[in-house]
Image (spheres, rainbow, N blue to C red):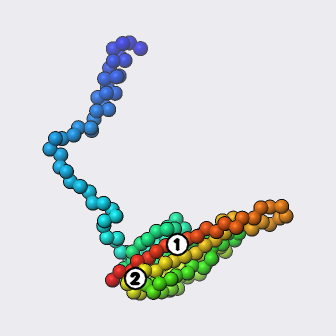
Amino acid sequence: MRRTTVLALAATALLLAGCGTHTSSTASRKVSPVPGNQAPVCRNQVRLTAADNGRTLCVAKGGEVRLGLTGTKDRPWKPVTVTGGALTAVNSGFVVRPGDAEAAYRAVAPGTGRLTSSRPMCAQPTAPGQMACKGIQDWTVTVTVKS
């Protein structure tokens, strides 16, 4: 490769690397709000899955929370339970696959409700000599209901 070609390539690379890095001395000092300081958005309809474990969410009074936990015959989810007076169970339809847990709740009063379920971490041994595990996978979501 010629020396001029190498220099041209190096100059092009430096020029491209500098694009978009200009800063202005008169740049505004606008501060973005911290997400933790914002009031949570209360929705009317919420659909939850196993991936929502540990979440805290807000539902408007009169809104609905539906959830589906996909399990297996060997690692089934227990029926979902609710604590607190903010949510009341409604018809969620029916469960088609063994091991799944389906539930639905209506937000009936301001307050907090906690949805919970669990399932085994591993299937029970099916043959002599296989290892058993006593681990439990917990699932919990906290629902805040606001008027």
In terms of secondary structure, where does tag 1 sit?
strand
> Image point 35% across, 22% down: which residue?
9
Q: Left of 94 or right of it: where is 61?
A: left
Residue 60 % position (x, y): 36, 79
State the residue at coordinates (61%, 68%).
Answer: 137
Closest to the observer: 14 or 147?
A: 147
Name which residue type carries label 2: Gly
Q: Earlier in the sequence, mark 2 or mark 1?
A: 2
* One can see residue 39 in this view: yes
Work out whether residue 123 or residue 73 is closer to the camera in this orientation and state it.
123
The picture places residue 70, in percent across and down from the top left corner, at 59, 69
State whether residue 102 appears in this view.
Answer: no
In the displayed structure, 21 sits above or below 77; it is above
Q: Nearer the viewer, residue 17 or 113?
A: 113
Residue type at mark 1? Answer: Thr
Residue at x 46%, y 80% (from the top left corner): 113
Say the numbered circle drawn on residue 140.
1
Question: Which quadrant would the C terminus be assigned to in this image?
Answer: bottom left
Q: Which quarter of the figure has residue 6? A: top left
Residue closest to the far left:
26
| Residue 25 in the figure: left or right of residue 68 | left
Vertical comparison of 121 with 46: above or below? above
Asked which quadrant contains residue 5, the reply is: top left
- Sort mark 2 into few (<14), some (14-19) or many (20+) by Cα contacts within 10 Å: some
Secondary structure type for disc 2: strand
Residue drawn at 62 percent across, 77 percent down: 78
Near mark 1 (Cα within 10 A), the count class, few <14, some 14-19 or many ≥20, is some
Instruction: Identify the residue position indicated by label 2 in the image.
Output: 111
Alpha-carbon span between mark 2 and mark 1: 17 Å
Q: Where residue 13 sits: x, y (%)?
A: 34, 27
